[in-house]
Image (tube, grey):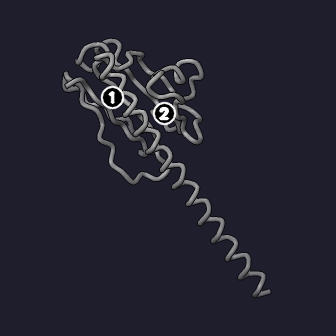
């Protein structure tokens, strides 16, 4: 009986450890994906003197998301779970290309990226527009990361 209980305890510990490893792996992929998107946005801006001015585009959008940064990012990354809008606590990526001078920088002169982590281990820098507007999405669970850039 004691042996069975020990085996069950060890099995439970292994399952918890494996689940934590999966969560960390998904978060590592999210951070790498966002770094890839930022590089693609930098290339896009360098060639066009503007960021894609699209309004909000989500990684769950099968039409606009794949074409967002062509040809700078060949295959647009998607969140490993990709179940919705990170601004509302789901796991996915959201891009906002200022298409209405919302951030005061001019159309196409600023962007916001929002994504969620399952384990928040970095601080969210937020985004401050040219007009001083500060944007910080936290979602229902404060695990959202908001970042952005604006023309220099």
Neighbours of disc 2 within 10 Å: few (<14), some (14-19), many (20+): many
Instruction: Kindly identify which numbered label has been placed on residue 75.
Output: none
Work out whether residue 134 or residue 30 is closer to the camera in this orientation and state it: 30
Count of labels in the image: 2
Instruction: Give the x, y percent position of residue 41.
Output: 37, 27
User: Does residue 140 appear anywhere in the picture?
Assistant: no
Q: Is residue 102 above or below residue 75?
A: above
Instruction: Kindly identify which numbered label has been placed on residue 42.
Output: 1
Q: Secondary structure at mark 1?
A: helix
Image quadrant assignment for residue 56: top left
Instruction: Kindly identify which numbered label has been placed on residue 93.
Output: 2
Q: Is residue 57 above or below residue 3?
A: above
User: Does residue 114 appear anywhere in the picture?
Assistant: yes
Relative to 74, 54 lies left or right: left
Q: Residue at x 41, y 17 (%)?
A: 55
Work out whether residue 121 or residue 88 is closer to the camera in this orientation and state it: 121
Work out whether residue 38 or residue 130 is closer to the camera in this orientation and state it: 38
Q: Residue furthest bottom?
A: 2
Relative to 19, 4 lies left or right: right
Image quadrant assignment for residue 60: top right
Instruction: Give the x, y percent position of residue 89.
Output: 49, 38
């Amino acid at each position: 009986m004691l042996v069975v209980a020990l085996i069950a305890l060890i099995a439970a510990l292994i399952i918890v450890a494996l689940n934590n490893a999966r969560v960390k792996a998904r978060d590592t992929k999210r951070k790498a994906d966002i770094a890839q998107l930022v590089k693609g946005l930098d290339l896009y801006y360098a060639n066009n003197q503007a960021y894609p001015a699209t309004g909000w585009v989500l990684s769950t959008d099968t039409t606009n998301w794949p074409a967002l940064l062509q040809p700078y990012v060949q295959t647009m990354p998607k969140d490993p779970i990709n179940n919705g809008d990170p601004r509302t606590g789901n796991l996915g990526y959201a891009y906002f290309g200022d298409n209405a001078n919302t951030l005061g920088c001019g159309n196409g002169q600023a962007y916001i990226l929002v994504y969620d982590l399952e384990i928040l281990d970095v601080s969210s820098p937020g985004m401050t527009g040219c007009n001083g507007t500060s944007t910080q999405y936290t979602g229902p669970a404060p695990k959202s990361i908001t970042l952005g850039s604006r023309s220099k």
